Amino acid sequence: MKSDGRRQGIMDFLMDTGTASVDDLASRFGVSKMTVHRDLDELEESGFLRKVRGGASIQPSGLFESDFRYRQKQAAEEKQRLAAAAVAVIEPGQTVIIDDGSTAGGIARHLADLRPLTVISNNLAVIQDLAGVVGITLIALGGQYSKKFHGFFGLLAEDTLRSLRADVAFLSSSAIHGASAFHQDQEVVHTKRLMMAAAARKYLLVDHRKFGRTALHFLTDLKAFDAVFTGRELESQMREVLDGAGVSLRIVEKV
């Protein structure tokens, strides 16, 4: 196995296990411990993991957490609740935008009951889920594929969004600081803003862990959304900030 493929394999393994020893990795990939150490050094330098005594663990950072496969595994039950609640704002016959986020992307599995619909998305998981579904007119945004975000971005996607109008858009964000949403990637921010501009109504779906965090790039003030869905009541201080800013917050509790 080539070094790039092996390092990706190490990352995939760590996403499932959280930690791994050098001995385990050497045995799993059929290489020497020295080779594993070199791989871990490269991955640590890139910010993807943290070397610990005798092995490595997931490095909690914006760079690592932006990976789509990692995001799919986090707060999965809460994200499912948010998606199930959010579809209540959709009516048959409408046009819906779904962004690249793993939280907003969960809406796709609920759309069959609301057909006919037109769905616009740059999220490859959404495109794969809805391709060929009777009653769903699917508009897949073109552009350059990003493995990290499992979606399409760039000039083609942006030009297409400027030419479209939708009834409702569902977006996700990687961090909420105060009454504002942030994201670590500027190209993703640009695409999300165009999605918001293309929709008459806009909703943000974020699991409760995103509050009180920040990322590099400002996305938008939360009051720009018709509502913000999250799965757990927030600390009183955070809630006061949101209420004071006029943010419509919907708490989707466990049944």
Image: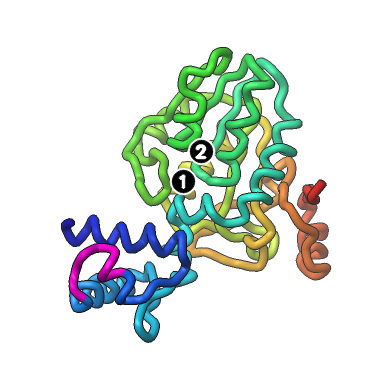
Q: Which residue is mark 1?
A: 190
Type of amino acid at the residue the image marks with label 2: Leu
Residue 25 sits in quarter: bottom left
Residue 33 horizontal side relative to residue 160, left or right: left
Which numbered tag is attached to residue 159? none
**Residue 234 percent across, percent down from the top left:** 78, 63
The residue shown at (71%, 37%) is: 84
Type of amino acid at the residue the image marks with label 1: His
Give the secondary structure at mark 1.
helix
Q: Residues within 10 Å of mark 2 (few under 14, many from 20)?
A: some
Q: Which residue is mark 2?
A: 194
* Contact, mark 2 vs mark 1 (Cβ under 8 Å): yes
| Farthest-out residue, left | 2
Residue 92 sits in quarter: top right
The magenta-colored residue range is: 25-32
The relative height of residue 40 versus residue 138 in the rendered view (above or below) is below
**Residue 160 percent across, percent down from the top left:** 42, 28
The residue shown at (64%, 48%) is: 79
| Residue 31 within the segment the image draws in magenta | yes
Residue 229 horizontal side relative to residue 185, left or right: right
Q: Residues within 10 Å of mark 1 (few under 14, many from 20)?
A: some
Q: Nearer the viewer, residue 95 or 110?
A: 110
**Residue 76 percent across, percent down from the top left:** 61, 51
> What secondary structure is the magenta-colored segment mainly?
helix
